[in-house]
């Protein structure tokens, strides 16, 4: 097994199959957000020139990799799935120390990543085109999928295993080579993902990693003419910049951004089931997921009953270090996110009714980490910042409505459109909601969070631009379609039908 930054404190770049120390002198410490006395890693912020080195390695590896039969590429991903499953506990513990989510949630993310690798391994035998009838006699027409070349993947800290995997796996099974730029907050876990791919047999130069700032390392990927496509997950501000700059350079771009996901509860719903879904959706992973349940839109007739139950259940949750098996919610990822959470909590105190949380946690473990309490607001106005802005923390806003019609309108009243849920036993309202809700993913009587490896993932409106991720459609972004015409008439044609 390769010696790697994932086994030590200093994170290195991965270029052409080798772990390479950055030439930069700029470093930042990554401390455990649940225990700031623990330095998990030291991250060197690579230069744009070093990013260009990774691009050169990917470009050099492309001609050989594209010539490898797609089923053989898929078998490498299958080996990676086995290796990742074998190392799942190691990955989960490192994720908890570096990112902060509790151990069982981290383990769940790793298992999901294994499933993605398993599914994408099969795509090596499913990279199919179409055979189609031609308007012309004695002509055979069909389409094939071909790789684009070097692709850049820019990934966030909140799902540091799953998101790199669901970008890299379809890219390389389709025959592309990759440069990964992970978040500096989760560089060590990203290195371990890359190590697993390398150990599984991904050839040198096919997957490369550069650790650095979005401005320098990410900017180099965006500007370099050899990078044919960028797949990004992160904030709307950065995504908008990537999409517009990519358009100027004629790059293919895929940007998955924010969410403000509603869980709609109607008066005939199973309230206990809705409470459990809202509790998990709002507070698991400290609310730091794009599919988190940040709004409950509920009919007035059952609002009091719902709130009494969820407040009671939330009070039983324990906040602390995710390595503690008794802990239900970990810390915010960093001080900036901590302050964002408390800023919205203070705003909520002035604009809504605080039912739970709100106070800064202190004493014991809380004095050494970025901890935020589970916080619930009632009587939130549908057009207020609490109901409109993506907070990305454990803050649940409850908006009361009169009826189903108002519920759908409120659910659609935000700029985002990633995920949604509806709790009801009324079949007509289920299908009406599915038809009218403006989200890329919707759930009926299940939480807003989660997505399976074989289904597309992505959103509408300000949530996402470009093609969907995961599922069979994931390879669409990483391939070009070529139409082929074979004329076997054996002679010159006098006229054409097209």
Image (cartoon, grey):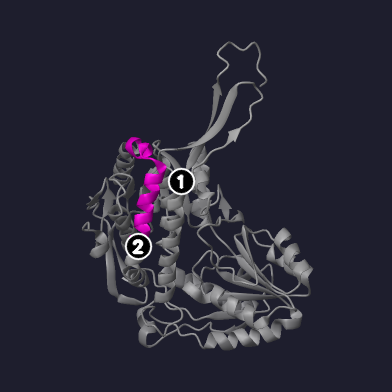
Give me the disc on residue 84. Answer: 2
Look at the image and say whether residue 244 sits in the magenta stretch: no
Give me the disc on residue 222. Answer: none
The residue that appears at 40% across and 71% down in the rendered structure is 107
- Residue nearest the viewer, comparing 363 with 173: 173
Q: Main secondary structure of the magenta part?
A: helix
The residue that appears at 74% across and 63% down in the rendered structure is 431
Tell me: residue 306, above or below residue 208.
Answer: below
Please state the extent of the stretch shown in magenta in the rendering.
63-84
> Residue 458: x and y, percent?
56, 56
Contact? badges 1 and 2 (CB < 8 Å): no
Tell me: residue 409, above or below residue 145.
Answer: below
Residue pointed to by mark 1? 125
> Residue 193: x and y, percent?
34, 59
Sort mark 1 into few (<14), some (14-19) or many (20+) by Cα contacts within 10 Å: some
Sort mark 2 into few (<14), some (14-19) or many (20+) by Cα contacts within 10 Å: many
Question: Which quarter of the picture shows residue 422?
Answer: bottom right
Q: Is residue 60 visible?
A: yes
The residue that appears at 47% across and 49% down in the rendered structure is 123
Q: CA distance from mark 1 to mark 2?
A: 22 Å
Asked which secondary structure carries label 2, the reply is helix
Q: How many marks?
A: 2
The residue that appears at 64% across and 10% down in the rendered structure is 494
In-image side of 194 versus 154 (left or right): left
Q: Is residue 406 visible?
A: no
In-image side of 399 versus 9 (left or right): right
């Amino acid at each position: 097994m390769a010696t790697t930054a994932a086994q030590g404190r200093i994170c290195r770049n991965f270029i052409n199959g080798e772990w390479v120390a950055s030439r930069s002198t700029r470093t930042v410490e990554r401390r455990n957000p649940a225990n700031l006395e623990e330095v998990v890693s030291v991250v060197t912020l690579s230069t744009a020139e070093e990013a260009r080195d990774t691009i050169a390695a990917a470009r050099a590896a492309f001609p050989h990799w594209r010539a490898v039969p797609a089923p053989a590429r898929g078998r490498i991903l299958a080996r990676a799935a086995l290796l990742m499953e074998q190392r799942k506990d190691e990955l989960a513990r490192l994720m908890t120390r570096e990112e902060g989510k509790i151990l069982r949630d981290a383990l769940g993310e790793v298992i999901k990543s294994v499933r993605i690798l398993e599914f994408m391994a099969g795509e090596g035998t499913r990279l199919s085109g179409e055979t189609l009838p031609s308007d012309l006699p004695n002509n055979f027409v069909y389409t094939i999928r071909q790789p684009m070349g070097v692709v850049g993947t820019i990934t966030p800290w909140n799902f540091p295993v799953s998101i790199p995997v669901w970008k890299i796996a379809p890219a390389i099974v389709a025959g592309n080579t990759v440069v990964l730029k992970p978040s500096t907050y989760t560089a060590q876990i990203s290195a371990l993902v890359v190590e697993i791919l390398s150990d599984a047999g991904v050839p040198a130069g096919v997957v490369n990693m550069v650790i650095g700032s979005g401005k320098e390392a990410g900017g180099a990927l965006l500007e370099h003419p050899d990078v044919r496509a960028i797949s990004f997950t992160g904030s709307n501000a950065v995504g908008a910049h990537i999409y517009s700059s990519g358009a100027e350079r004629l790059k293919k771009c895929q940007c998955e951004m924010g969410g403000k996901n509603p869980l709609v509860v109607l008066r005939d719903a199973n309230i206990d089931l809705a409470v459990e879904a809202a509790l998990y959706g709002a507070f698991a992973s400290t609310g730091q997921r794009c599919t988190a349940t940040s709004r409950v839109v509920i009919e007035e007739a059952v609002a009091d009953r719902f709130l009494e139950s969820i407040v009671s259940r939330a009070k039983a949750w324990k906040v602390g270090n995710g390595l503690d098996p008794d802990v239900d919610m970990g810390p915010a990822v960093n001080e900036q996110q901590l302050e964002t959470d408390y800023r919205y909590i203070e705003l909520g105190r002035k604009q809504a009714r605080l039912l739970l949380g709100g106070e800064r946690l202190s004493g014991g473990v809380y004095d050494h980490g970025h901890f935020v309490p589970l916080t619930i607001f009632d009587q939130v106005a549908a057009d207020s910042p609490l109901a409109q802005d993506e907070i990305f923390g454990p803050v649940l806003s409850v908006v009361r409505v009169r009826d189903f019609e108002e519920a759908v309108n409120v659910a659609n009243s935000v700029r985002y459109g990633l995920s949604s849920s509806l709790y009801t036993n009324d079949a007509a309202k289920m299908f009406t909601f599915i038809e009218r809700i403006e989200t890329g993913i919707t759930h009926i009587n299940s939480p807003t969070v989660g997505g399976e490896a074989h289904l597309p993932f992505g959103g509408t409106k300000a949530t996402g631009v470009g093609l969907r991720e995961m599922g069979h459609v994931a390879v669409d972004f990483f391939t070009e379609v070529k139409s082929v015409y074979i004329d076997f008439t054996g002679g010159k044609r006098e006229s054409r039908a097209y």
